Image (cartoon, helix red, strand yellow):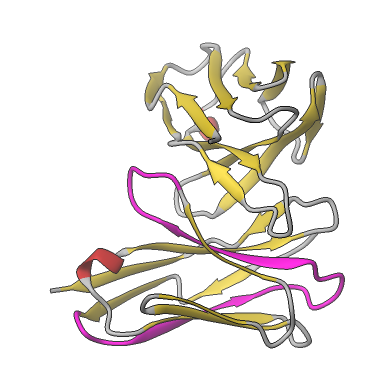
């Protein structure tokens, strides 16, 4: 069966520090992968999605970047964090079939101080 | 820019009450509407995927309806229980299979 792993669960980082969040999927090949963020008091906003290795699409201009160095690995990064990067980050994998539902990772709570 | 709206933003009910909330989405270029249940400190959990106008789906005490012509979906919970407390998210699936989420309805069921 397919599983999705995301880490770390929580992170407190100072402003200006770098960021790396990792997401890996098991049990499937060539998955479509997504990074979402929930900022305080807001809904889930799509940040990046990837349909394959090194194929990344950005949905909103921001201080973050994403990479997909391997088929089942999706990384969210920043060179210098801003206070506004605080939020809850979710990685998701899109299933196939008629429903095309998403399966989410457990999320990372990022607090930039 | 696609806009998905959910109301109310939050809802407090007593155990045993039935409740419902709304998701509004663009009525043109409709592909699917997804409902998720999101408990604190857990991953969002898929409830329903709805694709046809007039669809009604049910899972235990939770059910949902879909009106694609007017662009809304209702989620109903019958006889709310404290374990139903969560944020309920709806998401509109666009032509490229991306999910555009609403901001959610936060439900709190008091014992």
Residue at 68 percent of width and 59 percent of height: A99
| Image position, residue B4 (x, y; %) | 66, 67
Q: Is A94 or A88 nearer to us in this picture?
A: A94
Picture layout, residue B48 above or below residue A41? below
| Image position, residue B5 (x, y; %) | 61, 70
Outermost residue to the front = A1
Q: Is residue A23 left or right of residue A31?
A: left
**In magenta stretch: residue A83:** no
Q: Is A101 or A19 nearer to us in this picture?
A: A101
Q: Is residue B100 left or right of residue A108?
A: right
Total numbered labels: 0
**In magenta stretch: residue B22:** yes
| Image position, residue A88 (x, y; %) | 46, 38
Res A10 → quadrant: top left
Picture layout, residue B47 above or below residue A34? below
| Image position, residue B74 (x, y; %) | 54, 82
Res A64 → quadrant: top right
Residue at 37 percent of width and 44 percent of height: B42
Residue at 68 percent of width and 38 percent of height: A47
Which part of the image, by quadrant, shows the C terminus of chain B?
Answer: bottom left
Q: Is A48 or A111 nearer to us in this picture?
A: A48
Q: Is residue B85 left or right of residue B34?
A: left
Which part of the image, by quadrant, shows the N terminus of chain B?
Answer: bottom right
Q: Is residue A56 left or right of residue A2?
A: right
Q: Which residues are magenta?
A: B15-43
Picture layout, residue B21 above or below residue B105? below
Picture layout, residue B2 above or below residue B54? above
């Amino acid at each position: 069966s397919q599983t999705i792993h995301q880490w770390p669960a929580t992170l407190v980082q100072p402003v200006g520090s770098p960021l790396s969040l990792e997401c890996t999927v098991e049990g499937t090949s060539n998955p479509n992968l997504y990074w979402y963020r929930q900022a305080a008091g807001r809904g889930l906003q799509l940040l990046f999605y990837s349909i394959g290795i090194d194929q990344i699409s950005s949905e909103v201009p921001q201080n973050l970047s994403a990479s997909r160095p391997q088929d089942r690995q999706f990384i969210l990064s920043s060179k210098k964090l801003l206070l506004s990067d605080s939020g809850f980050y979710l990685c998701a994998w899109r299933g196939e079939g008629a429903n095309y539902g998403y399966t989410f990772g457990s999320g990372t709570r990022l607090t930039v101080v | 820019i696609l806009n998905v709206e959910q109301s109310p933003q939050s809802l407090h009910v007593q155990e045993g009450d039935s409740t419902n909330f709304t998701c509004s989405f663009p009525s043109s270029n409709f592909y699917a509407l997804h409902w998720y249940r999101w408990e604190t400190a857990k991953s969002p959990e898929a409830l329903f995927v709805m694709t046809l106008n007039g669809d009604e789906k049910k899972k235990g005490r939770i059910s949902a309806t879909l009106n694609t012509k007017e662009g809304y979906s209702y989620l109903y919970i019958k006889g709310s229980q404290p374990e139903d407390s969560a944020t309920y998210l709806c998401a509109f699936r666009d032509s490229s299979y991306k999910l555009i989420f609403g901001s959610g309805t936060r439900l709190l069921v008091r014992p």
